[in-house]
Amino acid sequence: MSTAEGRETPAEALARLYDLDLQDDPGDLEMWTALAAEADGPVLELMAGSGRVAVPLAAEDRPVTAVDIDAAMLARARRRAEAAGPDVAGRLELVLGDVVGLELGGAPGAGGRGPARRFGLGLVALNSILLLPSRAAQRAAWAALAAHLVPGGIAAVDTWLPDAHDLARYDGRLHLEYHRPDPETGRWVTKTAAAQHDAATQTVALTTIYEEGDPGEPASRWVRRDVVRLVTADELRAMAEGAGLTVELVAGGYDLEPLGPHDDRAIVVARMPGSGPAG
Ligand SMILES: C[S@@+](CC[C@H](N)C(=O)[O-])C[C@H]1O[C@@H](n2cnc3c(N)ncnc32)[C@H](O)[C@@H]1O
């Protein structure tokens, strides 16, 4: 929601700038499309943000429920779906909420009443699980996926695995990430960031500064602070198993080849025991 003067709020600006960051395509969409086809049922995306993954999945003729805690991100997801057409927008359900303790009950629009809804595929894309504030919260995200899967349904979580070389660079120094125009505003955006790794807590504190404006103009500045709570592939696997899922694959990239030495991400694909139709 914009301010009374119609100005963008900080949350709206940061959501817009998230999409500017994601002009660098992570290349994961084909993988999510393939997993959704294999699961063959409605899709639940947790921490879905601005609909980067949820909207293309809804465009493939599947009902998609996208959960996020940030209303400004969900507003962008809604606009993205509407731009893809009324059918796509009609298949995308947006839920504002915390994934920790998530309970989706009843049919879409039933006000959350009724037994837990079940999905064929539940996913957390692109390192999002690392933004949860504790190991317990990360485990709760897996529990939320498991609680909403049909028997035989698939849960998949994608995270980054930084190596020692990456972590050594996270020494708190500010560096330039990009200088690029935002197609939405026409203004140039300079993004700088500083990352600080803390080995004791296995976290990376990220400070990101966006400055926008044309040369010679006063710039608008937006700052965001994130703490990334790193996980190993083994920890991620244990979280899936702790949620009652059977791990079928730990992949090292979006081609879903098994994790190998020097891979910089882990995608854990797990299944809810049993078999049955999604609905
Ligand atoms: C890095 S963005 C990723 C968005 C999306 N998964 C993608 O791949 O483009 C992480 C998202 O997680 C959301 N988020 C953070 N903590 C959350 C929580 N506890 N419950 C639900 N969403 C959360 C943020 O609002 C943000 O939109």
Image (cartoon, rainbow, N blue to C red):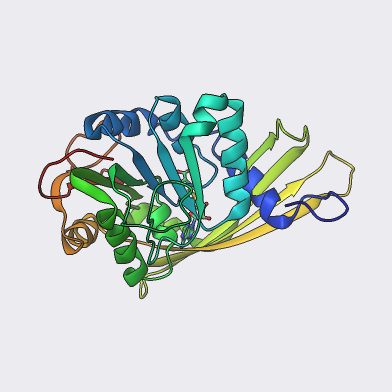
Identify the residue at image location x=29%, y=53%. 148
Q: Position of residue 261 (x, y in %)?
A: 19, 45
Answer whether residue 179 is visible to the viewer in this image. Answer: yes
Residue 212 sits above or below residue 114 on the image = above
Q: Nearer the viewer, residue 233 or 108?
A: 108
In the image, taking residue 156 as reference, residue 228 lies left or right, namely right
Q: Is residue 29 left or right of residue 263?
A: right
Quarter containing the C terminus: top left
Q: What is the quadrant of residue 223 in the picture?
A: bottom right
Q: Residue 35: percent from the left, percent from the top?
A: 27, 33
Residue 65 as seen in the image, left or right of residue 175: left
What residue is at 21 percent from the left and 43 percent from the top? 153
Q: Nearer the viewer, residue 14 or 260?
A: 14
- Quadrant in the rendering for residue 133: bottom left
Q: Residue at x 33, y 34 (%)?
A: 32
Camera sees residue 267: no
Residue lying at the far bottom in this picture: please name it: 200
Q: Is residue 191 left or right of residue 138?
A: right
Task: Report how many numbered discs are placed on residues in the image.
Answer: 0
Q: Where is residue 110 drawn, in percent x and y?
A: 46, 51
Please provide percent x and percent y for residue 159: 34, 50
Residue under the point 55% across and 43% down: 50
Q: Is residue 18 above or below residue 9?
A: above
Farthest residue, direction left: 274
